[in-house]
Amino acid sequence: MLVDSAGLWFRSFYALPDSLTAPDGTPVNSVRGFCDMLAKLITDRRPSRLVACLDNDWRPQFRVDALPSYKTHRVAVEDPEAEEVPDTLSPQIPVILEVLDAAGITTAEAEGFEADDVIGALADRERTDPVEVVTGDRDLFQLVRAEPQVRVIYIGAGLAKAQDFGPGELAEKYALSEERAGADYAEMAVLRGDPSDGLPGVAGIGEKTAAKLITQFGSLDDLLRAAADGDARLTSRIRTKLAESAEYLAAAPAVVNVVRNAPVVMDRESDVVPADPDLDRLRALQSTWGLGASIDRLIAALER
């Protein structure tokens, strides 16, 4: 199981009230929600191995160089190098990392890369076990594959409404080819764009049209070649739209595609789910930060 950690702690922060506080009054809503989600994932899905994947760089320079609009709306006003993070969330992230360390759960990051790239690299090189990617980011749908199996547990609507996507499910939902569902999805995403990441997409081409074009022509490269050649299967309007977006289409794949060879570093040698967490440290964190039953549930999940 590869967990998009920032996705979980942001989701927890916005799902739970900041009236959940430590004895000193510090909000711990994100910490508690994160622990609860992790405990439920471990209890329900029983992974034998688990890695909490981290953003070393939330807005890597190589993606900004390719597309300057990438995540510009999330840049902190007071620090152009930092992500806009709610004031009461920032102090909770070190606590979450402490809990993970005390629990013996492996974390991983790659210098200059996002958690998406860490997840992509670990999933791509796995040849022993089937992989489940837990995320609320649809970009990671591009990782699904049949063999060796990689599936995405999508929690965009919350963990209680998690959706399990493999190549078949992804192909069915978005009308893509099952054989290259992951690649089709990434190329469809380039055409469609994603305002949440600052990707404008191709004007006038929505998700359904994008999926149809990619599956009809086989790949984005083949589609662009067909458009350049005046292929009669494309309307003049579509050809014009693609031509007008040529600069964007040349740059966007470097932004959308996860880096499968990111230099991932783990904080410990084994990613096996620990059966013997450091109970003393966890109980101390529980007491210091008022984490209550959330730590109890995490310990119970690990000790089963």
Image (cartoon, grey):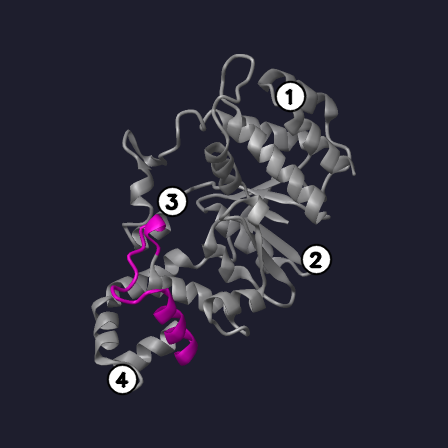
Point out the image quarter for the C terminus: top right
Q: Residues within 10 Å of mark 1 (few under 14, many from 20)?
A: some
Question: 10 Å neighbourhood of mark 2: few (<14), some, or many (≥20)?
Answer: some
The disc at residue 229 is 4
**What residue does disc 1 label?**
286
Q: Residue at x 50, y 46 (%)?
A: 115
Give the Cα separation between the discs numbered 2 and 1: 33 Å
- Amino acid type at circle 4 is Asp
| Segment tinted magenta in the rendering | 194-219
Q: Position of residue 214 (x, y in %)?
A: 40, 74
What amino acid does circle 2 point to? Asp
In percent of width and height, residue 174 lies at 46, 67
Name which residue type carries label 1: Gln
Q: What residue would you read off at disc 3?
A: 59
Picture residue at 52% right of the left edge, 27% below the top: 29
Hey, which quadrant is residue 105 in on the image?
top right
Q: CA distance from mark 2 to mark 3?
A: 30 Å
Q: Earlier in the sequence, mark 3 or mark 1?
A: 3
